[in-house]
Image (cartoon, rainbow, N blue to C red):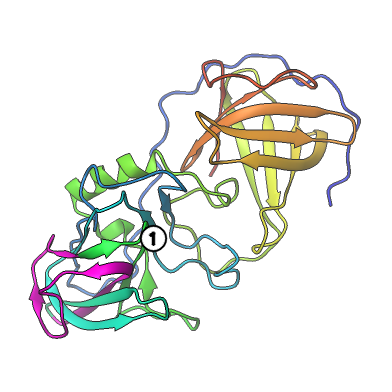
Amino acid sequence: MLVACVDRKLPDATTAIAGPTPVAGTPGLPTTVPGVLALSMPIDPGDSSNAAFGIAPFGYHGPVHAEDGHPGWEIEYRAGASARAAAAGTVESVVTDPFGRFTVQLQHVVGTHFYRTTYTNLVTLAADIEANQVVRGGQPLGNPAGTMHFQLDDFEYYRDMSNPNAVSPEPFLTVSAKSLFDGLWSRAFFVAEFVEPYPTNPRVIGFPLSRTWTRAGGDGPAGLRFTRLDAKTADYTYTLSAESGTVIESGTVAFDPAARPFSTIDLVSPTSLRRGVYEIISNEMKLSLAVAGATRPNDLAAASVYRTK
């Protein structure tokens, strides 16, 4: 637990936002072997939903994947939408889970390079989807039950852990697929994003896990560091720092990423409560944080901008 410091007035020097938001770079491909699969998104434009989270990223750690990190993307679909083949291939298997839902796996061969994509939690299965059938890219596979786990396995790549061949789909996306993904990602929200904010996060990592966000514009505190204590919970601590790097406040975090119209955050120290609203998209956070004891801001119009490496 972080030691609380004396509550004091936050730095009030306003800084202009430092240039345009740096684009969070797409990670490199996991292999140098020739034969790269080109992926489309397994969802059509307009078929997404943000009722629960939108998209949960690769590598993030939660109760189910506390040790090994999430081996794919979790994608939220609107009711009645179809999951689609992300690339042309052959149906490797169709299995039914204990809840009567279908998992479809497709094999994709590029030269001598073998890949597999997986689509889970389908409540219905398209009539022409069965083992050994050839499918085209974009072909409907079935209808997800709200959310679908989408996973890419690259068999030239191996980790000594569960789902050893799983790699992030992000660097394999076509230009149009990346554009669609970026739109979906900009609306996503989830409990791990204070410390694992990217579409692709490392699967192998230790807890407690910390991340520092540095002010790039606005009049908020100069630095904000979040620490997630355990992968199986959403418990966080925080510290606020001055320009010098000196810690000026610390405590615990209460937040609701699904709050509307903006995600809410409360920074709770032993002597004060600061209420705020925030938005995180990869390496940039917009945070509108009230002074201690004041009411929560209504929007992000006066938000400070923070960035992380």
Which residue appears at 41% of the width and 35% of the height? Answer: 22
Magenta-span inclusion, residue 167: no
Q: Is residue 257 above or below residue 191?
A: above
Magenta-span inclusion, residue 118: yes
> Badge 1, how many Cα within 10 Å: few under 14, some, many 20+?
many
Which residue appears at 8% of the width and 67% of the height? Answer: 136
Please give left or right for residue 189 compared with residue 82 in the image: right
Element type at mark 1: strand
Residue 249 at least partly seen: yes
Q: Position of residue 260 (x, y in %)?
A: 52, 32
Q: Position of residue 146 (x, y in %)?
A: 37, 56
Question: Which range of residues does the magenta coloring cover?
Answer: 112-141
Which residue appears at 48% of the width and 58% of the height? Answer: 201
Q: Which residue is mark 1?
A: 73
Residue 243 at least partly seen: no
Under mark 1, the amino acid is Trp
